[in-house]
Image (spheres, rainbow, N blue to C red):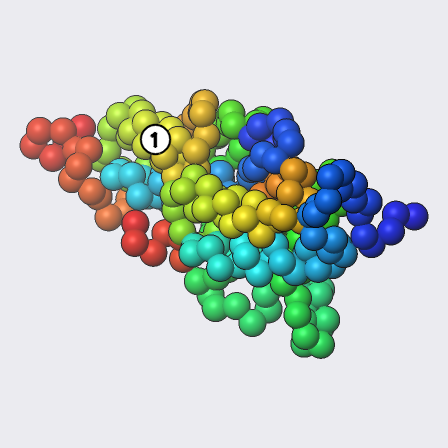
């Protein structure tokens, strides 16, 4: 069973900030949720848990070799939205032990509102 | 969820994965907006698909109607990386040249999937399942209003 905190090696002094996976999950979720035209995908079955407070992290999975974010798009075109979301995720991970881990953005749904101005 | 990676992951890279339903929604909307198209033919299979998509998309229960997933019925998508095979099923308005309408749908869907979704390679097949009376758009009518 893997621990919640990924191993860190910091040769030569100050290394990356040591964060738990749940902290990284919340960090990335908060950053990507601020991207215009995108929202985090929140499963219906988790709705009850949302009422208990904070569901954004459920849209983000963090492992030692991948950070995955599941999204709903509310605007088109997608490429600039996703580029922005990727930048925000990378910026959130900068300075942590996940700074060099690939980020995967999964566009799981397109909302009807994406076609509002079309 | 049906999805395919658009690029191989690499260190510090950002990989984008699209659900096939996202591609289908854009294709369906584009086809529906093409002059001469009466409707995108969802059919029974499409209805089941739409219900499945709605269930899978797991959108918040308290979301507005506009936040519901866009319709994907009437479009089949096979997505591999950033390449897509798309099949659109249509009903065309009576009086509209069917072949010209189908070609226009092909052209518009390819363009929208490249521009709006970012797909690199798109192949679009169009099947016209019905020709029926409806509000006729003049765009594709020939001279004198007849095909």
Residue B41 location (% of width, % of height): 45, 41
Count of numbered labels shown in the rendering: 1
Residue at 53 percent across and 34 percent down: it is B76
Image side of residue A17 versus residue A71, left or right: right
Q: Secondary structure at mark 1?
A: helix
Q: Chain of mark 1?
A: B
Above-or-below relation of B28 to B71 = above
Foreground pick, B64 / B128: B64
Above-or-below relation of A99 to A23 = above
Residue A13 location (% of width, % of height): 73, 44
The quadrant in which the C terminus of chain B is found is: top left
Which residue in the rendered view is the most extreme toward the left?
B144
Which residue in the rendered view is the most extreme toward the front?
A12
Looking at the image, can residue A1 be seen?
yes
Would you call the spot at circle 1 few (<14 residues within 10 Å), some (14-19), or many (20 or more)?
some
Above-or-below relation of B123 to A63 = above
Residue at 74 percent across and 59 percent down: it is A22
Above-or-below relation of B35 to B67 = above
Image side of residue B81 versus residue A75, left or right: right
Foreground pick, A65 / A11: A11
The residue carrying mark 1 is B111
The quarter holding residue B12 reads: top right
Foreground pick, B147 / B120: B120
Looking at the image, can residue B98 be seen?
no
Residue at 54 percent across and 54 percent down: it is A32
Foreground pick, A4 / B85: A4
The quadrant in which the N terminus of chain B is found is: top right
Residue at 17 percent across and 37 percent down: it is B139
Residue B87 location (% of width, % of height): 48, 30
């Amino acid at each position: 069973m893997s621990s919640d905190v990924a191993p860190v090696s910091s040769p030569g002094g100050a290394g990356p900030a040591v964060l738990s996976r749940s902290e990284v999950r919340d960090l990335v979720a908060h950053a990507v949720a601020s991207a215009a035209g995108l929202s985090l995908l929140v499963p219906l079955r988790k709705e009850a848990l949302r009422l208990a407070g904070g569901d954004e992290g459920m849209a983000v999975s963090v492992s030692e070799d991948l950070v995955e974010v599941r999204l709903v798009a509310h605007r088109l075109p997608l490429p600039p939205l996703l580029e922005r979301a990727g930048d925000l995720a990378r910026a959130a991970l900068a300075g942590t032990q996940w700074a060099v881990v690939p980020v995967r953005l999964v566009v799981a749904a397109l909302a009807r509102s994406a076609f509002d101005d079309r | 969820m049906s999805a395919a990676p658009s690029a191989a992951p690499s260190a510090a890279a950002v990989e984008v994965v699209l659900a096939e339903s996202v591609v289908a929604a854009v294709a369906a909307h584009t086809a529906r907006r093409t002059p001469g198209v009466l409707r995108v033919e969802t059919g029974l299979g499409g209805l089941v698909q739409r219900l499945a998509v709605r269930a899978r998309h797991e959108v918040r229960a308290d979301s507005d109607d506009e936040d519901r997933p866009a319709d994907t019925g009437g479009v089949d998508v096979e997505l591999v990386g950033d390449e897509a095979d798309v099949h659109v099923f249509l009903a065309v308005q009576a009086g509209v040249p069917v072949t010209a309408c189908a070609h226009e749908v092909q052209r518009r869907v390819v363009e929208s999937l490249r521009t709006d979704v970012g797909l690199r390679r798109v192949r679009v097949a169009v099947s016209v399942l019905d020709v029926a009376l409806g509000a006729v758009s003049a765009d594709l009518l020939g001279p004198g209003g007849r095909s």
